Image (spheres, grey):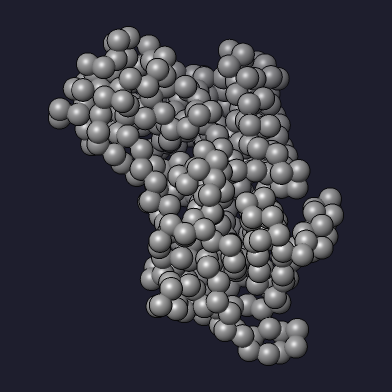
Amino acid sequence: MTASIATNQTILVVGGGISGMTAALEAAECGKQVILVEKTPTLGGRTAQLYRYFPKMCHPTCGLEINLRRLKGNPNVKVMTMTEVTAVAGSRGNYNVTLKVAPRYVTENCTACGDCGKAVTTEVADAFNYGGGKTGAKVKAAYLPHAMAYPQRYVIDASIVGNGEGEKAKSACKYGAVDLGMKEESVQLNVGAVVWATGWRPFDANKIQPYGYDRYANVITSVEFERLADPHGPTGGKLLRPSDGKEAKNIAFIQCAGSRDENYLRHCSRICCMATLKQTQYVREAYGDGGKSTVYYIDIRAIDRLEDFYANVWKDPTVSFVKSKVARVAENSANGNPVLHGVDTEGYHRYATEHDLVVLAVGMEPEVTGVKLPADIIQDSSNFIEGSKDGGMFGAGAASSPLDVNRAVQSATAASLKAIQVIHKSASTEAA
């Protein structure tokens, strides 16, 4: 099926995380028509996967709930989930865009009652809880991505379409919302400007061979730890070791895991230090004075108002700091504990320190997997999007640079204003 929508007075925003939502809303609230596309079944991106923000330690609902309310009440924004850009042609003020819309197998009749999920037994990896990694989280093959998902509509995994499990889900739906006959669609757009807010992905920890993520169960990433700490996560908020399910009370945090390294990522990802400082407070919340966090760092990069948060964590008696780039991680085979080896540069003595769990503060990479970027796009040496040669496409948020949530929102607002300028100039040219 092929459909055609939009005009060259429309702005296309690619990516439905906090940056994409912000860019779309800023333009829409200025009276512009916006199409917001997201490749996953729901908006929110990686911000929705956080347990808390730093430095205020509030939950992501603080920002997402407001944005979702603004989206629902604004007719200028058309949201398309499970949608990817496959081609962009044309030039500034007049782009022809091809979208691929994957079948959800659930229609807008869905009330999110959950009966379809109760009816099936097949489970698939829970992407929201990083189920493909150390959390091992599973979800029913008919599922709501997470509690704040927008649209608030279930998804049927393609693996059960065409078999008895899919039919169970269909039969269980009293609203007739399960449509197993849905097919992939192609949509053609004509838009005047494009904002690329495709976000970021955590660096693949398997590539950091000295740290043993691929070999040792009790070496996990910072994003996996974030989900473990969340009461709505795979362990109900308990900080449990993947190897044996025991509580991890003595936790090592390794900074710059894959960042600032010519072998992996050359750039500093900026957020990693603050993310770790935040996560040490999860350990304190879980165990009080009975927990212990050790931060192995090259230097701590906390700026502006974040310096106060850093100072408070430094005073925490349950948190220790070791100035060192960890050389390697081994394992005590008797108990599964990771053992960190390196040199403490403050005193220059060697250490071989055992911990219950190691958390790798992995760096940020631009999320370009499967993204069909046009040839006109300009990227920096780390593949972050700077814009386009013709000045009609813009990078926003973490797609343009490693940024925390606050700065990603600022970046998205700036990109939206630039896109609005393109639309204005296009309209003026047509009028002339």
Q: Residue 188, relative to residue 262: is it above or below?
A: above
Closer to the camera in the image, 58 or 17: 58
Closer to the camera in the image, 149 or 73: 149
For the N terminus, the image quarter is: top left
Closer to the camera in the image, 64 or 400: 64
Q: Choose top left, top right, bottom left or bottom right for residue 266.
A: bottom right
Q: Is residue 339 left or right of residue 324?
A: left
For the C terminus, the image quarter is: top right
Q: Residue furthest top?
A: 175
Residue in the picture at 66% in, 78% down: 324
Q: How far from the left and from the top, in percent, is residue 65?
A: 63, 26
Q: Residue 345, relative to residue 203: is it above or below?
A: below
Q: Is residue 135 left or right of residue 284?
A: left
Residue in the picture at 64% in, 61% down: 291
Q: Residue furthest left?
A: 163
Question: What is the count of numbered marks?
Answer: 0
Q: How far from the left and from the top, in percent, is residue 340?
A: 55, 78
Q: Is residue 86 left or right of residue 322?
A: left
Res 256 visible: no
Q: How far from the left and from the top, in percent, is residue 66?
A: 67, 25
Q: Residue 78, relative to residue 417: is it above or below?
A: above
Q: Residue furthest front?
A: 290
Closer to the camera in the image, 26 or 298: 298
Res 135 visible: yes
Q: Residue 378, relative to residue 208: is it above or below?
A: above
Q: How far from the left and from the top, in percent, is residue 405?
A: 67, 43
Residue in the picture at 37% in, 22% down: 114
Residue in the picture at 61% in, 47% down: 398
